Amino acid sequence: MLIGIISDSHDDMVAIRKTVDILNSEGVFHAIHAGDITSPFTFEVFSELTCGISAIFGNNDGDKILLKERFKGNIHNQPFITTVQGRKIVVLHEPDLVDALAESRYFDVVIYGHTHSPDIRKVKDTLVINPGKVARLHKGESTLALLDVEKMQAEIVVVP
């Protein structure tokens, strides 16, 4: 079972479209957005996902009331805690508490965004994932992460 993990889409509709296409073609079971969607109009493209999506608010998200409405309540304040296939997952935007949460061994997966830099690593028994950034702003490639929940393995995928 694959989970698609994305972050920092920053209203880049072209990159969001490509990301949705990748997630759909990979057959992800669920998508998680780790913040900085930015504007509610992006849901026009996110609504084309063939799976569900959960998201959190990042530091650049604007109209939170309309974002919550468009995402049908599936956008949350951080930290957002969920369970998928028996795996406990916590989602943050900023990285400040990532290592402490991972070291606690309470969560199987800690997901974060904000830095625009991909990061997949193990801290004790916890998998830490930053998918990088969807948006084509700043330096670096647009990326997302795919998490195989059963194998507890993740990979970074470049968004062309």
Image: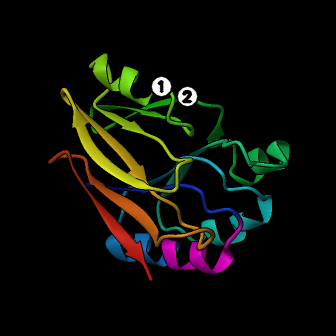
Q: Where is residue 76 in the image (x, y as percent from the top left)?
A: 64, 36
Residue lying at 37% horizontally and 59% vertically, measured from the top left: 145
| Secondary element at tag 2 | loop
- Please state which amino acid type lies under the numbered disc 2: Pro
Residue furthest front as drawn: 139
Range of magenta residues? 11-19
Residue furthest left as drawn: 151
**Which residue is nearer to you in this view: 102 or 22?**
102
Please, what is the dominant secondary structure of the magenta stretch? Answer: helix
The quarter of the image holding the C terminus is bottom left
Is the C-beta separation of discs 2 and 1 under 8 Å? yes
Residue lying at 31% horizontally and 16% vertically, measured from the top left: 104
Mark 2 — residue? 79
Q: Position of residue 107 (x, y in %)?
A: 32, 25
Mark 1 — residue? 97
Do we see residue 47 in this rendering?
no
Report if residue 18 lies within the magenta region: yes
Indicate left or right for 148 with 19 as reference: left
- Please state which amino acid type lies under the numbered disc 1: Leu
The quarter of the image holding the N terminus is bottom left
